[in-house]
């Protein structure tokens, strides 16, 4: 068989190559957790859902925007919740883009079935609330919360939303400004993990994933080097 007649080997897209020169045929997702939100002890559960950014959270959003200012970003998508929209806006502004709001990127509501006018301590009691927090930290499962929204349905929603964004943006790098629960459930699905909350994602951390159809490659998780410019300690209440 001559060289010309030899069958050509079809090479799969190298999703895991960090030095890749072209994104042709794939989508690079920069999954970014929002900046720190302003919450306080025993805050009414209904107010927790869409708590705004704190002063520190706005600074975190600003510096992640500056960090990505020199990176080629082709689109910015975000959750409809204000903390994600403001974070997305800080990034999009450097690229002349408008964030696209996607309802499927909303955070999991751990207190969805609880009385929304009550604080978490009023509803669960301080001791029980601490027990639930510790149990979730130990197991990584969102189903620990008795009033949470349907967890399998949440995972289907967020993985479907991100898959839709990836498919619509082949050959492009896309910022997805969303939430720790959204990112963790997407990673759990990509890594075939039964744990819901695999990683303690810092506010405005960057998690990079490449997608080609039903193939995903996780390149990096929880990169928050940029916040050291504005943050030297952790707020235990906000995480």
Image (cartoon, rainbow, N blue to C red):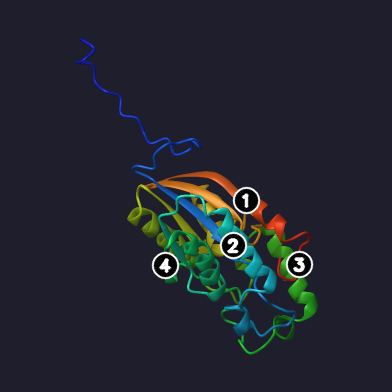
Would you say the residues marked 4 and 3 are in contact, meaning their CB atoms lie under 8 Å apart? no
For disc 2, the marked residue is: 180
Vertical placement of 150 versus 25: above or below? Answer: below
Q: For residue 148, what is the image quadrant? A: bottom right
Q: Are marks 1 and 3 in contact (CB under 8 Å)?
A: no
- Label whose residue precedes the other's in the sequence (3 or 2): 2
Q: Secondary structure at mark 2?
A: helix
Say whether disc 4 or disc 3 marks the residue closer to the N-terminus.
Answer: 4
Which-is-in-front pick, marks 1 and 4? 4
Q: Residue 171 placed where, x, y %?
A: 36, 47
Q: Which is closer to the viewer, label 2 or label 4?
A: 4
CA–CA distance in space, label 1 to label 2:
13 Å
Give the crowd class for mark 4: few <14, some 14-19, many >=20 residues within 10 Å. some
According to the picture, the residue beneath numbered tag 1 turns out to be 223
- Identify residue for label 4: 98
C-alpha gap between disc 1 and disc 4: 24 Å
Decide which of tag 2 and tag 4 comes sooner along the chain.
Answer: 4
The Cα–Cα distance between marks 3 and 2, rounded to whole angstroms, is: 16 Å
Point out residue 101 in the picture as x, y percentages from the top left corner. 43, 70
Which label sits on residue 129? none
* Mark found first going from the N terminus, 1 or 2: 2
Secondary structure under the numbered disc 4 in the rendered image: loop
Task: Identify the residue under disc 3.
Answer: 235
């Amino acid at each position: 068989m001559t060289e010309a007649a030899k069958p050509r080997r079809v090479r799969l897209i190298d999703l895991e190559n960090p030095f890749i020169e072209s994104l042709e045929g794939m989508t690079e997702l920069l999954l970014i957790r929002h900046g720190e939100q302003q919450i306080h002890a025993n805050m009414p559960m209904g107010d927790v859902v869409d708590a705004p950014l704190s002063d520190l959270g706005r600074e975190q959003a600003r510096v992640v925007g500056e960090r990505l200012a020199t990176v080629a970003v082709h689109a910015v998508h975000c959750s409809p919740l204000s903390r994600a929209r403001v974070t997305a806006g800080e990034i999009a502004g450097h690229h002349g883009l408008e964030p696209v709001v996607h309802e499927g990127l909303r955070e999991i509501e751990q207190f969805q079935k609880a009385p929304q006018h009550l604080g978490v301590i009023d509803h669960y009691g301080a001791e029980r609330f601490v027990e639930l927090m510790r149990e979730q930290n130990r197991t990584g499962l969102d189903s620990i919360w008795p009033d949470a929204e349907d967890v399998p349905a949440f995972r289907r929603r967020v993985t479907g939303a991100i898959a839709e964004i990836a498919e619509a943006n082949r050959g492009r790098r896309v910022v997805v400004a969303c939430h720790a629960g959204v990112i963790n459930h997407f990673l759990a699905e990509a890594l075939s993990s039964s744990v819901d909350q695999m990683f303690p994602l810092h506010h405005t951390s960057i998690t990079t994933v490449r997608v080609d159809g039903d193939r995903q490659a996780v390149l990096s998780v929880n990169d928050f080097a940029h916040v050291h410019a504005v943050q030297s300690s952790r707020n235990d209440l906000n995480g």
